[in-house]
Amino acid sequence: MAAMEWFTPWFSAPGYGLSRLVLQRALAGVYLIAFLSAAFQFRALLGERGLLPAAAFVRRVPFRATPSLFHWRCSDRFTGGCAWVGAALAAAVVGGAADAVPLWAAMMMWALLWFLYLSFVNVGQIFYGFGWESLLLEAGFLAIFLGNAHTAPPVPALWLMRWLLFRVEFGAGLIKWRGDRCWRDLTCLYYHHETQPMPGPLSWYFHHLPKPLHRAETAANHFAQLVVPFGLFFPQPVATVAAGIVVITQLWLVLSGNFAWLNWLTIVFALAALDLSPVAGTRSYDPTPLWFAVVVCAASVLILVLSYWPARNLLSRTQQMNRSFNSLHLVNTYGAFGSISRVRQEIVLEGTDAERVGPETVWREYEFKGKPGDVRRLPRQFAPYHLRLDWQMWFAALSPAYTRGWFEPLVARLLENDRAALRLLRTNPFPDRPPTHVRAVLYSYRFTTWAERKANGAWWHRTWVREFLPPVHVVSGSDHDAGRP
């Protein structure tokens, strides 16, 4: 008992009780959204008849390389059930279930959330190849060791959350500074709001801000990502001020675009540095169980050891973005937009019910939920929900190399009016019977000017570039067999 009395003051941080509560509930909310994304999209993207079937992937790749429940069973029913179980468990944690059970049971709930989502990420291939997938897993693993309402927040786990936030912000800042010259001459935001993967409803207005304000935005971003993160490790109130700056800059990014749950997760991590005790007070907790302290310290040592590779990457001139150094995604490296596109190109999928294709053929467009299509449609807000196919279409427009493996199956699904695939889209111009031919064309998109917007009501102006995929049609009953006329 005397040993624990000596141990508790430096191990426990009772003043961070409210910060932990909000952090855990918000993190569980992100888990909920992630599992709902899997429930609604996994089957069409990675199911038995998906664009990149996970069942075929697990036959090629061993369990040790991609640990996942789906190495055991990978049917649509099982993966769908896992997604809904994860969503239900996440919703329960949001509602306070993890605080209503013993500490060991709460840790098991967080561990189950982590492993369920790891199972999806490790078989998700390019559709789960985004940095925020690993970010959620790394944060979810740390959450196992944050405790619950029965014990004071452990200092090591809170510091590891700050270390994660530091790597997210500082890594993103370094990749920009080392990358595209426009970040150093403060001109990247002349283009970024227009060419980002999935603009939001306010992106048009952000794009039309005065150029001096764009330069100020860029400079503020460098300050927030290259200077402020060091403040997270200073004593209070400096750490709280640094966390507050991170929150404000992330909310600015939330308003200006759709980046799934990346910005929201970053805000969640900032809570680990917020001292809310002057507002909420400090409650008393039961003594910290010795077994819990041992487990937290052991996990902390593991994370610190694994941090060697991300830390080395931060210092490297050949810094990599969004890389996991182990198959469990425990400690990773992050970053985004090391280079900025100056021109926006979009792939538009079109179909026709004409028996023969010629110059007079009437083509009808498929509309996606999030990515630009109809020039008069205001971009929608979807984040923190992740539209995985829409994001891949943005990459595909950058280079045909990004279409490898999934684009032709998508076209084949459209040729047969596959219900699962069509649910990924906003509109189907052929509700009664499948099209006879489908093609893809490439357009250059730009935001309209104030005058153009007033004159024709359009948010976008687009110009034909070229045919991306010539017309194809079904040539047999095979699942993916489509041919060009």
Image (cartoon, rainbow, N blue to C red):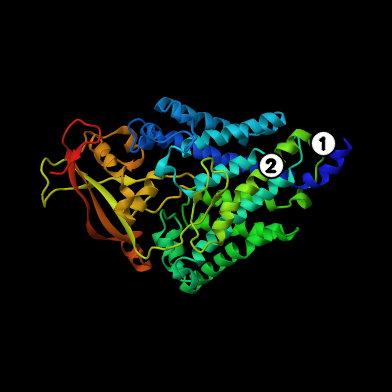
Label 2 vs label 1: CA separation? 18 Å
Residue type of the residue flagged with mark 1: Pro
Does the rendering let one see residue 436?
Answer: no
* Foreground pick, 300 / 388: 300
Tell us which disc is closer to us: 2 or 1: 1
Q: Where residue 288 sits in the image (x, y, percent)?
A: 79, 37
Residue type of the residue flagged with mark 2: Leu
Label 2: few (<14), some or many (≥20) within 10 Å? Answer: many
**Image height check: is 282 above or below 254?**
above
Q: Where residue 140 sits in the image (x, y, percent)?
A: 59, 41
**Which element carries disc 2, helix, strand or loop?**
helix
Q: At x 61% / y 53%, what residue is drawn?
A: 165
**Image height check: is 170 above or below 89?**
below
**Which element carries disc 1, helix, strand or loop?**
loop
* Foreground pick, 291 / 428: 291
Q: Where residue 205 sits in the image (x, y, percent)?
A: 45, 63
Q: At x 74% / y 43%, what residue is drawn?
A: 154
Q: Which residue is mark 1?
A: 287
Task: Examine the image and state in which quarter residue 251 appears.
Answer: bottom right
Q: Where residue 224 sits in the image (x, y, percent)?
A: 59, 63
